[in-house]
Image: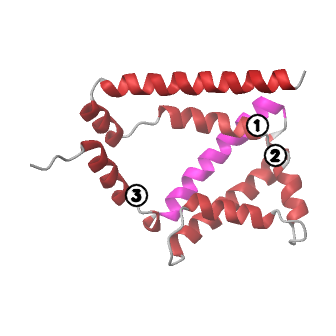
Amino acid sequence: MTQTNPIADAAADLLQQEDERRIDVARHCALLVIACALGLFANWIGTGTSPLEALPGMAVLFAVCVVGLAMARFIPFYLPSVAWISLVAIVVTIPGVPGSAFVTDAVGKLNFLALATPALAYAGLALTANEFAIARRSGWKIVIVAVCVMLGTYLGSVVIADLTLRLGQ
């Protein structure tokens, strides 16, 4: 009798469903426009920088994301879209690359924490049907594991922060 792991099966199904080489670049562009608008608003609230002043930097980030998504879609070998986007961002900010000074100055008007906060809040709240199915199959034991992981991560962070602060004195 062979036992199967339902969590591993669900994860394998999820990986098969999410082949990034089939991404719809146009749909992702529309979602990026919404994310950029939210980012400009969050940057304005968080830093007081005018959305019009921060718009060129956001346009650069949008363009980098679109180019990275297109590369993930059309280049024949697989590399995750986040890797392509990171690669494009690194290349356009290398000193000596034409326009890198403009890119660095424009993006410098954006605050990372202001941009990350809405994205991380959404990521924390966004649960798919697959995640609920995995949780249902896992049962109550997964709650204990999750609490232990979160508690351990928090306590580990506290210890590292405390040691760092003590070394700095």
Q: Amino acid at mark 2?
A: Ala
Q: Secondary structure at mark 1?
A: helix
Q: Position of residue 68 (x, y in %)?
A: 62, 65
Q: Position of residue 105 (x, y in %)?
A: 89, 53
Numbered range of the magenta stretch? 24-48
Q: Is the residue marked by circle 2 packed among few (<14), some (14-19), or many (20+) residues within 10 Å? A: many
Above-or-below relation of 148 to 73:
above
Kindly indicate whether the residue at mark 1 contacts the one at mark 3 (C-beta within 8 angstroms). no
Kindly indicate whether the residue at mark 2 contacts the one at mark 1 (C-beta within 8 angstroms). yes
Q: Which residue is mark 3?
A: 18
Figure quadrant of residue 38: top right
Q: Amino acid at mark 3?
A: Glu
Q: Which residue is mark 1?
A: 43
Q: Position of residue 74 (x, y in %)?
A: 52, 75
Q: Which residue is mark 2?
A: 54
Magenta highlight on residue 33: yes
Q: Earlier in the sequence, mark 1 or mark 2?
A: 1
